[in-house]
Amino acid sequence: MAAADPSSTAGDHVPHDRVAEITRFEDSKLGVKGLVDSGLGAIPGFFIHPAETLSSLRPGRPGVDLIPTIDLAGADSDRRAEIVERVSRACRELGFFQIINHGVPVEALDRAIGAVRAFHEGPPEEKAGMYTRETKTGVSFFSNIDLFQSKAASWRDTLQIRLAPTLPSLEDIPEVCRSEVVEWNQHIQQLGSLLLGLLSEGLGLDMGRLEGLTCLGTRIMVAHYYPYCPEPDRTVGIASHTDPGVITLLLQNHMGGLQIKKDEEWVEVEPVPGALVINVGDILQIISNDEYKSVEHRVLANPSKEPRVSIAVFCNPSNREDSFGPIPELISPQKPALFQQFLFTDYLRRFFAKELDGKSLVNFYRL
Ligand code: OGA
Ligand code: NI
């Protein structure tokens, strides 16, 4: 998922009483946490997912042996070749990996999670005052980016902050997390640059190639809060989707529930202390001409009283007027371009017109 879009409209397929229920929820401006705080014992009907989703909701296969945790120590020196090889393999086979010794101090990870949690657990009237689907100021609070497009809503709330090309005015960032957001952005910028270098080399390209395409130029932070769900067997925390951007850098707290789809089977992305989760987005799959894979993932609804908190930063190209498509060096007679060229603005418009779902966007541009 990604940034909220003001131009989204209600889907035509939704029956009227459902629209009324969703609208009441939206107008409360209190999100899912507001429902939980009101003490409800059952989830409202519009959160209930279709039977085929519900029948797949169970802890996934343990991922520890499958999803690599890559130690980045020495990435700028003696271990670079080995690290590039591991990152490249993970992006080709799974589209997901975890990293440790990534240069972001453990205290900064804890501070970021703590600050996001403090925001979501702060005064409801302050959050309600920020509740919006507009992105004008670069800061917004809402529940379910695709509330009006999806078949069923999911059990989470989101604080979204634009980090780049420019941070919002500092006074627009909630005070409880202001310094932490500024600090997080600095860490993510540095780490994002290191990762894009490794990812470029993993494709056999110069280290600066992806950054040269402005792949780090737009960064959107989405800070999710997955409160206790009284009926975790009837809904999800975030529905199965792929991320639209280039790469996502994700910090999750220790609660678990993130799963990726591998050969039609769900696999857990277990929280690793001190680690960040990195995944390939649709744009990177396209510009890498299918070398790297953007993989479906989801989060189960949280059955515990303790909240699940996560912070994703989506990196997107900032150059929106140029056309994008497979990088020329990755096209050859043996491997022709598998995708058409397109404008990034067109791509985003298509993303926001639909619900979070599987791989429809990648396939739309496939030749
Ligand atoms: C997302 C996402 C996972 C998480 O925001 O796109 O996949 O752990 N989040 O919150
Ligand atoms: Ni995602």
Image (spheres, rainbow, N blue to C red):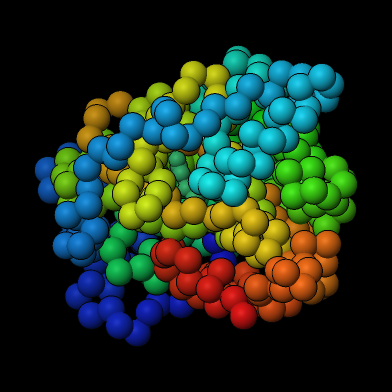
Residue found at x 66% / y 19%: 101
Q: Is residue 108 visible?
A: no
**Observer-nearest residue: 175 or 338?**
338
Quarter holding the C terminus is bottom right
**Observer-nearest residue: 276 or 126?**
276
Query: Hey, which quadrant is residue 253 in on the image?
Result: top left
- Could you tell me residue 295's position as x and y percent? 49, 53
**Observer-nearest residue: 8 or 20?**
8
Q: Answer left or right for 203 relative to 25.
A: right
Residue found at x 71% / y 18%: 73
**Observer-nearest residue: 135 or 218?**
218
Residue found at x 48% / y 66%: 359
Query: Hey, which quadrant is residue 232 in on the image?
Result: top left
Q: Is residue 367 visible?
A: yes
Residue found at x 55% / y 55%: 294
- Could you tell me residue 126's position as x and y percent? 48, 41
- Could you tell me residue 87's position as x and y percent? 65, 37
